[in-house]
Image (cartoon, rainbow, N blue to C red):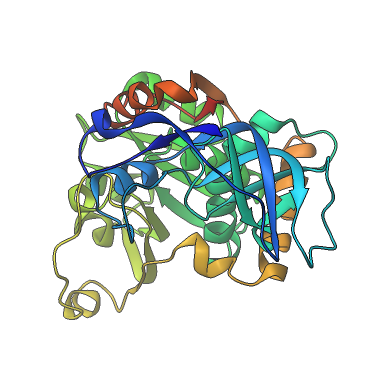
Amino acid sequence: MTNAICIHEYGGPEVLKWEAVDVGAPGAGQVRLKQTAVGLNYIDVYLRTGTYPQPEFPFTPGMEGAGEVTEVGEGVTDLAVGDRVAYAGPVGGYSEERVIPADRVVKIPDGVDDRTAAAMMLQGMTARYLLRRTYEVGPATTLLFHAAAGGVGLIACQWAAHLGATIIGTVGSEEKAELARAHGCTHTINYGDEDFVARVKEITDGAGVDVVYDSIGQATFPGSLDCLKPLGLWATFGQASGPLPEINMGILAQKGSLFATRPTLFNYVAKREDLLETANDLFDVVRNGHVKINVNQTYPLADAADAHRDLEGRKTTGSTVLLP
């Protein structure tokens, strides 16, 4: 037996229960991990509240972590007992130990510690696909990144700066504005006391941006569209402020023949080769110092409810790790 956070009904942080569970041996194509660190992400809130419904109760939330392989199932040839590995998905991370498909984990290279790996897999690979595949960012790019001081935002700002882009980031306080600028954000907008659409137009001399990366949802729609150049791309990849309304596609024509996409990491890394390419690109920029992963908060895994309260209360910055 081992311990894990279990959810028996959807609800607030109080539904996160620390319980004994039986993990079992790995089956064919699986490995068993003893976890050393578990990442906290906003998707965990969506799992807890039922925004992303799960097939059955009870279930263990959590989408990323790092640890050591302790058992290898039949047919697994590229991993061995003792390997340090990390993953982003599938659900089940809030546990001291877990069984996971072997094709979903990647080896952690020397020079990257377990806490850093656990903190960066979901957020870092999200930043990677957004900047390298959803829209290929380069020196000619001007972009708007909402929640620039969040976990994905701080990674994306550093990475986009490394790629030579001009980065406009929205934040909720002057403290977060300073943090975003320290991580490569060229211009910051405090949406609490500034109109972000008007400021983007001012910063870009009326031209608008090439791409908007929007994980906020309801509160930034349709303003995000008004920040784009004609033929610009709106990438909406989250809904921290609530779900978007039903969208009449005609609005994209009205605002400049815009493109819109609702990407998810799991489509971008569905193939094993895409997962390895994405993860290794992330490991490279971290090991080379182009992107620093800020683990600004740690909590005992048993206290996951406190971590969720702070995350939803916007009290966290950068990345947060839960320690089994």
- Of 206 and 219, nearer the camera is 219
Q: Residue at x 30, y 56 (%)?
A: 52
Work out whether residue 185 can be spotted: no
Q: Position of residue 248 (x, y in %)?
A: 15, 77
- Residue 159, compared with residue 136, is above or below; it is above
Residue 285: x percent and y percent?
A: 73, 44
Task: Using the rendered view, name the quadrant where residue 283 is placed.
Answer: top right
Q: Position of residue 317 (x, y in %)?
A: 44, 26
Determine which quarter of the picture holds residue 56. bottom left
Q: Nearer the viewer, residue 48 or 170?
A: 48
> As rendered, which of 291 and 143 lies closer to the eye?
291
Determine whether, in the image, residue 251 is placed left or right of residue 295.
left
Please state, as top left, top right, bottom left or bottom right, where the C terminus lies in the image.
Answer: top right
Q: Is residue 176 above or below residue 269?
A: above
Depicted 63 relative to depicted 187: above or below: below
Q: Nearer the viewer, residue 243 or 193?
A: 243
Residue 297 appearing in the image = yes
Task: Please give the name of the residue rendered at 83% of the width and 45% of the height, measured from the top-left corner.
Answer: 81
State the residue at coordinates (73%, 61%).
Answer: 276
Residue 68 x, y percent position in the rendering: 74, 38
Left or right of 114 on screen, residue 190: left
Please tell me which residue is depicted at 51% across the width and 64% down the height of the picture. 266
